[in-house]
Amino acid sequence: MEDLRSIVEALIFASEAPLSVDKIAEIVGVEDRAAVIAVIKTLDEEYAGRNGGFHLAEVAGGYQFRTRADMASWLRKLKGIRPPGLSQAALETLAVVAYRQPVTRHEIEKVRGVDVSGALRGLLDKRLLRMLGRKNVPGKPIIYGTTKRFLEVFNLKDLSELPTLREFQELQE
Amino acid sequence: MSYAIKLDIFEGPLDLLLYLIKKNEVDIYNIPIAVITEQYLNHLELMRSMNLDLAGEYLVLAATLLNIKSKMLLPPEETEEGEEEQPDPRAELVRQLLEYQTFKEAALDLGRRTLLERDVFKRGPMPEVKTDPEEELIEVDLFKLVEAFREIVAGLKDEDLLEISTEKMSLSDRINEIMEKLSVEKSMQFRDLLADVRDRRMMIYTLLAILELMKMRIVRACQTHTFGPIRIFLAVEE
């Protein structure tokens, strides 16, 4: 189905956010998700075979054209930006939330042993974390979780793609 | 003094303790508490002498270490059953250290991934968190929102306000209702959200619900120009 291939390619090309199979199926109006997936697979192979400057990446539950990692220095020049730095404190806080969500601030602090309000605020502002609601315990503390944007920025298909935690696994048994 | 540079980079008391354990090449399951406690306290002293802001958490862990140390000095209690195992006073600390170390490594792994806008790029500009397309939106603060609420309520004729219904509805029910509406509409006028309900209690619940959602940064209240209609936007991704 040559038509569908072009449509899917155009949609992914023009989309700001990673485009999910469901969304594509909805726009194109096909019932058959498998057909969309098959087309995406062809596109993926096509771009990989071309060995060009970008490829079709599967992230955050969808598909997105992304530049190759070894092109980074050129693109930074183009965009005139310095790589966005996430501090060690921010990364640790993010890691605790990613693996333990939904999680309260107190629970994060128990793991890290320090106050995390500053790190949390920064991550909320960067939209890597969001508030999910409140925990039904005294004080009704806010619970936090990661966002779709977290998956997009950290190049993850979904949360299950996070590597399993080392050591702590053994510890829990 | 190589210390001076290193001090800054500790992420907290647990990080400092892990560093000392590694530096001394001791077994984390069998920490020589006396030695490590002494070095830990020396580090704190050093940090203090350098006027580094010593977070309270460092002192809490110092107290914990001293507590464990004193417990270890006590002779094991004689138990009737003889060889009954005494719980190791260090056990909880070891658990904490291992847990922290696990997440510290997980954080390093996260930082090593191919990050968007650092290693790989997508088409178009990264949407800035603050800028909105087309029209400049002004964030509405608490006072303006409450003011608008008062105006709306004052503008209602008495007959518009029905008796308080006996139907029991909680604030969280109202929050959920508003969230449902917003997830369909993406944004709604503040006035329309209030127009849904016609008794005072529900109107107040609506205001409280919006304030709560704003506080949690789930929604934002904005207007396109001063005195313009206030719209409530969904601020988070689905």
Image (cartoon, coloured by chain):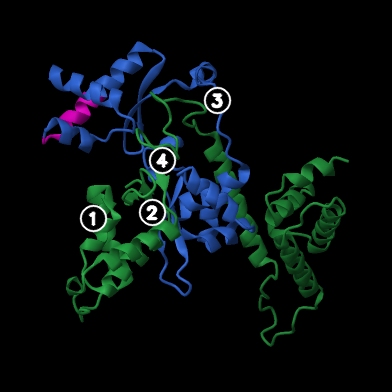
Chain colours: A blue, B green
Determine the secondary structure under disc 4: helix
**Residue in the foreground of this view, choosing between B10 and A127:** A127
Residue A156, horizontal then vertical, whole percent? 41, 37
Q: Quadrant of residue B126?
A: top left
- Indicate the amino acid at tag 3: Ile
**Residues tagged by mark 4 and mark 3 found on one chain of the structure:** yes
- Indicate the amino acid at tag 2: Ile
Chain name for mark 2:
B
**Residue in the foreground of this view, choosing between B92 and A140:** A140
How far is disc 1 from disc 4 in space, using C-alphas? 23 Å
Residue at image mark 1: B181
Identity of the residue drawn at 79% across and 69% down: B66
Residue contact at pointers 2 and 3, CB within 8 angstroms: no
Residue at image mark 3: A81
Residue at image mark 2: B218
**Residues tagged by mark 1 and mark 4 found on one chain of the structure:** no
Left or right of B1, for residue B237: left
Does residue B236 show up? no
Count the marks. 4
Magenta part of the chain: A31-40
Residue A162, horizontal then vertical, whole percent? 44, 43
Q: Which mark is residue A149?
A: 4
Residue A159, horizontal then vertical, whole percent? 39, 45
